[in-house]
Amino acid sequence: MDFGFNLTRTANASAWRLLPNRWDFVAFPLIICVLALTAVGFHETLAPISTLQTQAISLDPANLPEYALRTTLRMLAAMVASLLFTLIYGTLAAKSRRASMVLVPILDILQSVPVLGYISFTVTFFLALFPGRVFGAELAAIFAIFTSQAWNMTFSFYQSLRTVPRDLDEVSRGFHLTNWQRFWKLEVPFSMPGLIWNMMMSMSGGWFFVVASEAIVVGNRTIVLPGVGAYLATAIGERNLGAIGWVILAMTVVILAYDQLMFRPLVAWADKFRMENTSSGNVPESWLLDLIRRTRLIHQLLVPAGWMIGKLARVPLTLPSLQGRLPKFQIGGALASARSKSRNPSRTGDIVWATIVLALTVFVVWKVTVFVSTGVTWSEVGHVVWLGLITLFRVAVLIAVASVIWVPIGVLIGLRPALASKIQPLAQFLAAFPANLLFPVFVVVIVKFNLNPDIWLSPLIVLGTQWYILFNVIAGATSYPNDYREAATNFQIKGWQWWRQAILPGIFPYYVTGAITASGGAWNASIVAEAVSWGNTKIVAHGLGAYIAESTANGDYPKIILGIAVMSLFVTLFNRLLWRPLFAYAEARLRLD
């Protein structure tokens, strides 16, 4: 009898766990709404491309919810693609010394290529991939947004993989974790706080180029996709200040929505990956994460997925080591000696690899030179290099000013999770605020007071990119171990000594990552900021960004390639001569071991 009673009680308990509770009735409508909106947005992409010509962008505010939905779905699709790219590319660059010789410089070049540069050559490809369908144009827009998101996230992940504490790495090897297990159980969790803050920055930074991605103008061809960016471009063209006000309101609502529904839960969830030995005084909170945890039926539905993911992460899958295999069952000096030998590649292999890379580089340079020479003279090349020096000076000065302002503020926010949760939506909104919305103010003021555009258009370059520094510093301060802070307090380290010996070394790798992406983003922003318009009034500053913008509008491909090549050269040299040595110093001397 007792056995039967226990079976009955167990069966009743199992059935009770499958019944929804009051929290399920709150969460289910949210999930259904998200799925329905996603389905509606995807259905619109299957329409014939001719509908883009017949359905002009309307400035009626009633259309803004649909436009905001289309833009948000594009940005989320680009974010998913960026995350996959980050995990694959960042791992290869961090794990293989030979691959990093190629992948890291390529990443420098990719982040320096302006969004307009990608659009100029990818629109035709994607339209040909899906002829006669809006889906091709949608992919071109998503790819353009992807190029404004992926590089920042990849640099952050790469920096985290290169600075994993040595003691944790030794522990993982002591447990004989395979490369696959160590990647998912150590390296990805360690990188998660910084990666999530950079995902926020990437999502917000995507708004800066959403106009270029949704209102595509290449030569005589114009493709306008329904969205907030196209709405904003139309409002600027018609000088409609009321419509611009509606855009700001729509952006505010969307930013608050994905802050509450995506990033706030991710920040609260990632807090468990903080590297520290003592508990944090303030823990980030998320009402949505708490809601999901309180649900009964939804929680039971998510348990199998979580179980499968956990099992996949623990599969003892042995992947080919990118650094060379280590002999097992060796300890002490023998293990160190074996590891040293395994990580010391043969000189012959280095020579062969360097020769292949050099040959490919020479081939690419030769092909670009041949193409550019068909429509560009040597005097034009010298002129473009001079314009690049002008933009370089602007970028260097603005990044220095932004660093002085935002590093202390980022530390203040990052060390106070309660303050960070309040500042986070405001920082995301400011980061997402497109410089295009300030064009009317700058144009009117410059024209009215007859100001020099070379000086007064410069702030537009850094308005959208300074946040890379802020968000990365916040990520670094958030990841700073709480036991280190307590040790500094116990030893009464204060003032400038605390900045110099405690916090700045701890956040320096994150700052360098933010500065690299901020400088690359500033070069990209120069395309938009050095040539601004308000209706029929256009103001152009001297610089490489204005040159590329005008060449793209004219469809002059040799000049577009020349401008992109010069910009890539400047960014790569700037990173190689300044940021990379600083990053190597941070990796070697400032690791939190």
Image (spheres, rainbow, N blue to C red):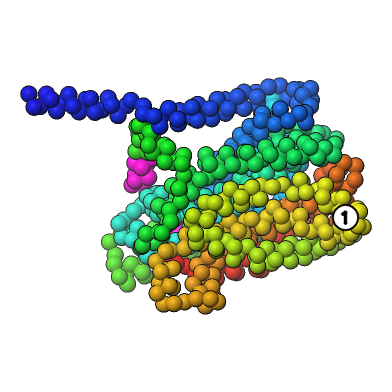
Q: Which residue is mark 1?
A: 446
Residue 161 placement, left or right of 215:
left
Q: Position of residue 510 (x, y in %)?
A: 55, 61
Q: Position of residue 442 (x, y in %)?
A: 83, 52
Q: Is residue 515 visible?
A: yes
How packed mark 1 is, by other alpha carbons closer than 10 Å (few <14, some 14-19, many 20 or more), is some
Q: Measured along the vertical axis of the image, is residue 511 above or below residue 439? A: below
Quadrant showing the C terminus: bottom left
Residue 450 placement, left or right of 356:
right
Quick one: which residue is furthest to the left in this view?
1
Residue 59's quadrant in the figure? top right
Tally of numbered discs: 1
Q: Is residue 363 visible?
A: no
Q: Nearer the viewer, residue 426 or 451?
A: 426
x 75%, y 26%: residue: 52
x 65%, y 67%: residue: 404
x 57%, y 58%: residue: 472
Residue 83's quadrant in the figure? top right
Magenta segment: 308-323
Quadrant showing the N terminus: top left
Q: Measured along the vertical axis of the image, is residue 417 above or below residue 220? A: below
User: Is residue 321 found inside the magenta-colored segment of the image?
Assistant: yes
